[in-house]
Amino acid sequence: MYHQLKRKGYATAVDVLMDLEILSKTDYELWRNGKVLYLEKVCKVNLKKLSTILHEMRVYAKKGNLKPSFCVYKRWAVKKKNGQGKKPVIKLRFSKSGSEDIEKWYATHFVDTKKIEKMKEEKQVNNSDDKQ
């Protein structure tokens, strides 16, 4: 989580799992494209270890005063019917059980609001320097 927060200003369970090599980028993409029923199926550790990781993320976030932000993970590459109208949203599933609490913790991003604010300020300064 630390490295994600330093780099992006927020941390996600999926990125932590990939950083720990519990989830491969290929398996993540298969899940995002709807080829895998639920994310836990392609993780390289058991459910107890996954649960521990999610718990540790929450503890770290609380200690660091990180803001929890729920995100909806939608399937990629959904095609429109007949090329008309909006694409249907297909919500992805993280857990085998489908438990609402478990799904919520996988989908929660933890945001370092101070870091995000600092990054925005730096971007504005860089943009104003480019215009001069």
Image (cartoon, grey):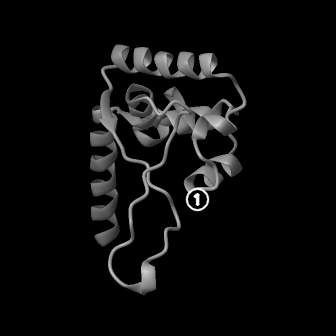
Can you tell which quarter of the image residue 126 is in? bottom left
Name the spot of residue 14 as percent of width and height, x first.
54, 38
Image quadrant where one finds the C terminus: bottom left
Work out whether residue 102 or residue 27 is closer to the camera in this orientation and state it: 102
Look at mark 1 in the image and give the residue it sits on: 33
Side of 76 relative to 91 (left or right): right
Q: How many marks?
A: 1
Q: Residue at x 62, y 18 (%)?
A: 49
Name the spot of residue 25 as percent of width and height, x first.
67, 48
131 in relation to 113, above or below: below
129 in relation to 71, above or below: below
Can you tell which quarter of the image residue 9 is in? top left
Work out whether residue 25 or residue 5 is closer to the camera in this orientation and state it: 25
The amino acid on which the numbered mark 1 sits, given as a three-letter code, is: Asn
Name the spot of residue 85 as percent of width and height, x first.
32, 80
38 in relation to 80, above or below: above
1 in relation to 31, above or below: above
Inspect this view and state whether residue 81 appears. yes
Q: Residue at x 50, y 22 (%)?
A: 54
Work out whether residue 44 or residue 91 is closer to the camera in this orientation and state it: 91
Q: Residue at x 32, y 41 (%)?
A: 116
Name the spot of residue 50 as percent of width and height, x first.
59, 23
Farthest front residue in view: 97
Side of 131 relative to 53 (left or right): left
Can you tell which quarter of the image residue 70 is in? top left
**SS under mark 1:** loop
Side of 84 relative to 26 (left or right): left
Q: Residues within 10 Å of mark 1 (few under 14, many from 20)?
A: some
